[in-house]
Image (cartoon, grey):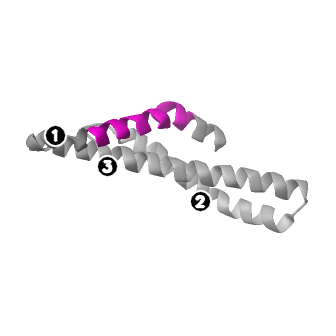
Amino acid sequence: LQNKCDNIALIIKPEKIKQELERIEKEQEDPNFWQDVLRARDTNKEKVRLNRLLETYQKTKNSLDESVELFELAQNDNDEVTLSLLYEEAPTLEHSVQKVEIEIMLSGEND
């Protein structure tokens, strides 16, 4: 799962998404931006899409990072209860990673 998450980061480039969101925010601050209603609508749709993709990715990455850290601690302490809980949570993490992968596949204009 960690490899998949790393690959997702290579594909979506979270830092570039953040930069694009900042650019859109600045663009939306210009009063003339709202004069072109169609362009404003399309830009806002893109902003929502990018925000959703970034948020989903960040939540998944944070959960995965926390689980990896907890796994390492539990393994070092021979904490069978925590290890068992982590194994139970693994399918949920896998589902989260798959959700991000699907969002990437469906992130084109016509999707």
Q: Report the span colored magenta.
A: 7-26
Residue 66: give x, y in percent of width and height: 68, 54
**In the image, is residue 16 part of the stretch drawn in magenta?**
yes
Q: Nearer the viewer, mark 3 or mark 1?
A: 1
For marks 3 and 1, give the CA distance.
Answer: 17 Å
User: Residue at point 8% right, 42% down?
Assistant: 35
**In the image, is residue 99 part of the stretch drawn in magenta?**
no
For marks 2 and 1, give the CA distance.
Answer: 42 Å
Q: Nearer the viewer, mark 2 or mark 1?
A: 1
Q: Secondary structure at mark 3?
A: helix
28 left or right of 62 in image? left
Q: Secondary structure at mark 1?
A: helix
Write down the residue under mark 1. Answer: 33
Name the kind of residue labelled 1 in the image: Phe
Residue 103: give x, y in percent of width and height: 41, 45
Image label count? 3
Q: Nearer the viewer, residue 95 or 12?
A: 12
**Most common SS among magenta residues:** helix
Which dot marks residue 92?
A: 2
94 left or right of 29 in image? right
108 left or right of 58 in image? left
**Quarter of the figure that contains the N terminus:** top right
Q: Quadrant of residue 3?
A: top right
Classify mark 3: residues with Cα within 10 Å, few (<14), some (14-19) or many (20+): few
Q: Nearer the viewer, residue 99 or 67?
A: 67
Name the kind of residue labelled 2 in the image: Thr
User: Residue at point 72% right, 61% down?
Assistant: 86
Tell me which numbered mark, 3 or 1, is placed earlier along the sequence: 1
Name the kind of residue labelled 3 in the image: Val
Q: Are marks 3 and 1 in contact (CB under 8 Å)?
A: no
